[in-house]
Amino acid sequence: MEVYPEEITVVFFYNVFSVLIAGPVCLFAESNLTSWVLKPDISLAAIIYSGAFVSIFSALIHTWGLHLKGPVYISLFRPLSIAIAVAMGAIFLGDALHLGSLEMARGAEEETVAWRYFYRDVVPFAAMVLVECVTVGSNTLFKAATLRGLSFYVFVFYTYVVGTLVLLPLSLIFKRSTRLPPAKFPLFFKIFLLAFLGFVVGMIGAKGIEYSSPTLSSAISNLTPAFTFTLAVIFRMEQIVLRSSSTQAKIIGTLVSISGALVVVLYKGPKVLAAASLTSSSSTIPLYQHLTSFDASWIIGGLLLAIQYFLISVWFILQTQVMEVYPEELTVVFLYNVCGTLISAPVCLYLEKDLTSFLLKPDISLAAVLYSGGLLSSFGLAIHSWGLHLKGPVYISLFKPLSIVIAVAMGAMFLGDALYLGSVIGSVILSLGFYTVIWGKAREDSTKTMAGSEHSPLLVTQSQTIEDEASSLRYD
């Protein structure tokens, strides 16, 4: 990369030479020629995913990063892969985690407190981080596609269609062995209401990103914990004791988060990260123009995104209630996408007058639709539903502030977005509010744990805890 800093060309030749090297070796090593005939199953999906995302997308980012930051910096991110691997292995493969001679297996009869901590704390944490990465990637691809002419009506409609097609076989194959309550009309009505709410969220969010940027969307998403905490209190999913330090911390953190979001929306400020050619000209701009943001589209986009994330908090609350009644994630998300398709079809066809825009070409628009529908509308929503059932809405919403870091990196790499001072200041304020709420939540949980242990005999508590953990984890 120092000799020839053209990432796409270098990675292209890398793949060409790899094909030439692997061809004779693999043909010789794999003598069964029938194994080269792939069927439309998990084998074909694994090859397409690895070829598209690892051999192309990942190799490009690695090459770009090596050229920009050097090999040591890039290698420092390898330890993060253990968290993602643990989450995906436990969710999709049922992998066991070995620690010396201790085996924590999901299907084992000897469920332990260590496995309970791993399954209920480590796995949800890693899974939620993964979902935030997927969400920011979807927002970034959508923004790039709209710059090339993709209609957001077409985008919203096709994401539901792709999500439905992906989840249709999965909801039938990976069905739970546990007994589920019968699906009645109130359940289907709630799922339809979820789909309608999700459709409105998608429409507002897409329009908000079109007016602003994925970075602003991720900044405004930091309001989600505040909205969700408020709604959880209203629906009695969270308790408030004003004299307790944990409640005071959660309330203060909520107010600080709202203040940070207002700073991001109302104060754009000068560019912090911009091209060198723009830096010199920015010094001639009067100072008063830095103190307020006069970009009308930026403010409109921020307001639309704030409405979107408030509705997402409502979605969290309603989805939690659905999962308590019918804890089958893939089936619920599949029905959700079906209802979303039925709702979006007439609306998007009516609003998008140009029917030729529904004919997607193999370019960035098709990539954005397949990525968002195949990963976000299917797997992302399934993981969210699982996390809501396991940890509750407030816990899930606390991961939204992580998306700002991911969005800034992806926006700078793929969209050329500038980073503004208002986004930096607002994000710092938002982070302070976020960690204040986290501290209050953790203190509240520890207080409940200590109170429960004080009012129960030791032997009864230990035996009962083991039985409850075993039955609960078998159900999960």
Image (cartoon, rainbow, N blue to C red):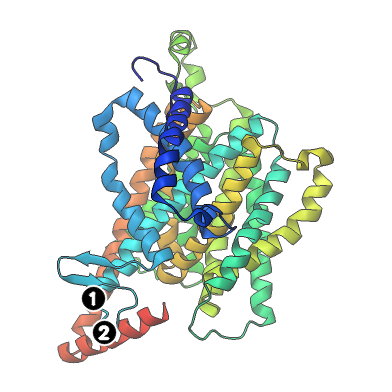
Residue, x 37% and y 33% (percent of image)? 62
Q: Is residue 150 left or right of residue 347?
A: left
Q: Residues within 10 Å of mark 2 (few under 14, many from 20)?
A: some
Dividing the picture into quarters, in which one does residue 39 lie?
A: bottom right
Compare residues 117 and 234 and report the one nearer the observer: 117
Residue, x 58% and y 44% (percent of image)? 305
Reading the image, the residue beneath label 2 is 465
* Location of residue 135 with respect to 438 vertically, above or below: above
Reading the image, the residue beneath label 1 is 113
Q: Is residue 384 left or right of residue 469?
A: right
**Amino acid found under the numbered disc labelled 1:** Val
Residue 182 visible here: yes
Compare residues 158 and 320 and report the one nearer the observer: 158
Q: CA distance from mark 1 to mark 2?
A: 9 Å
| Disc nearer the start of the sequence (1/2) | 1
Residue 33: where, in percent of width, then height? 50, 53
Residue, x 25% and y 38% (percent of image)? 76
Determine contact: label 1, label 2, CB under 8 Å. Answer: yes
